[in-house]
Image (tube, helix red, strand yellow):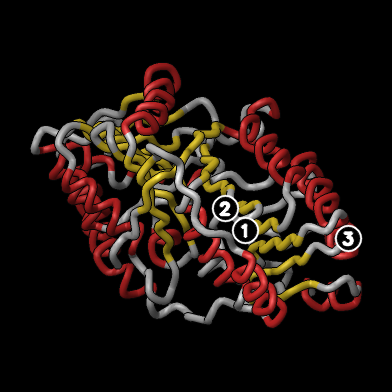
Amino acid sequence: MPVKWTEGNAFELLENGEEFFPAVFEAIAAAQRSVVIETFIIFDDEVGRGLQEAVVDAARRGVQVDITVDGYGTADLPDSYIQSLTEAGVRLHLFDPQPKRLGFRTNLFRRLHRKIVLVDGELAFVGGINFGADHLIRTGPQAKQDYAVAIRGPVVADIEADALKLLSASNLGRSIWRRLKWRRRPKQETPGGIVAAWVARDNDEHTDDIEHHYRFVIRAAQKQVTIANAYFFPGYKLLRDLRRAAKRGVDVRLILQGEPDMPWVRSAATLLYDYLLSGGVKIYEYCERPFHGKVATVDGQWATVGSSNLDPLSLALNLEGNVMIRDAEFAACLQEKLDTLVDSQCQLMERGSRPRRRLQRMLVGVFVFHFLRRFPAWAGRFPARQPRLTSVAADVDELHEVKS
């Protein structure tokens, strides 16, 4: 699908929870009309309770607050937390909640993985940071390294339109959507501002927009490509584009997890190392702590920040959202952050650094690439339900029905 670019935007890069959470909570505290939040995870910890306090205060002073959480990622919030929101007037929506089977969550596929905060239709936050204390570096070695952006300008209206479209998937949400849409203000451009686009992935009309945009800029790259991604297992075509870019002289660098929060992530990514390294792609493993970012820069002119990993779940199943940014100053700012990781907190991978017998490597490689070639078609056979939101009322009995 064509990308809709808008001019006159302003961006601020936010690194980790130490910068992200205070900015979001301050914006919610200043909200006058509406707050719309989408997130994969809210934990009942110091960060989750900070969000709880901020939105409850906003709702009590008359701000319309809508929070949509994923039914898989946020399945264990205590009843008391949820009831405190609904009793204050916060509208809480669960994306595709499903009952547990034998004590296990079964709704693994087609998740709401976007992370969006919208305040008064004028300020947006987009990135990969969930509402949990594990995004605060001060909490210890398992804290996640991640990024987000604060946005003002016309592209905020495009992000808001997408969020309100999702809200319309519930009966309550349809009336919310109509009212908020009516109250939206004309786009306000920042003179001399940044050119940007909101690019989403869904299971309807935008099934491969984010991957398509990555591939487009990689194929057009002339000097440099830096991709920093938490879960890296992309399709064969994107891998081939990276390798071809490196072979034509582009400095292609990947920053991947060396200390992942889930060990299988590293194992999956390393299956691709030989193919990429043999083509001249440089791979750095971030070893300071788990890496959770989903960012990239190209040629010092283009950058992206968002929720989409480069793996099968993000590229073929989940609802995702990234902002694409054409601006040398912002790209340089993000590139400086990534260069710091490479220089002081990453290990450069080399061919043969994980030796395997040649036959084993060949057999695994054949399997991996056949899987990557065919996964998009296979993914289309997973249950393709329409987005379904369950709006939680202040009734505790109804709450138990939703979570049981």
* Amino acid type, residue under disc 3 in the picture: Ala
Q: Which residue is mark 2?
A: 115
Give the mark nearer the N terminus: 2 vs 3.
3
- Spatial separation of the CA atoms under disc 1 and disc 2: 5 Å
Quarter location, residue 342: top left
Q: Position of residue 251 (x, y in %)?
A: 20, 31
Give the mark nearer the N terminus: 1 vs 2.
1
Rendered image: mark on residue 157: none
Rendered view: 301 above or below 86: above
Q: Secondary structure at mark 3?
A: helix
Q: Which residue is mark 3?
A: 88
Rendered view: 7 above or below 140: below
Give the mark nearer the N terminus: 1 vs 3.
1
Looking at the rendered image, the quarter that the C terminus falls into is bottom right
Q: Are marks 1 and 2 in contact (CB under 8 Å)?
A: yes
- Taking depth in this image into account, of 135 and 206 the one nearest to the observer is 206
Q: Secondary structure at mark 1?
A: strand
Q: Residue at x 77, y 43 (%)?
A: 29
* Amino acid type, residue under disc 1 in the picture: Glu
Looking at the rendered image, the quarter that the N terminus falls into is bottom left
Quarter location, residue 334: top left
**Can you see residue 165?**
yes
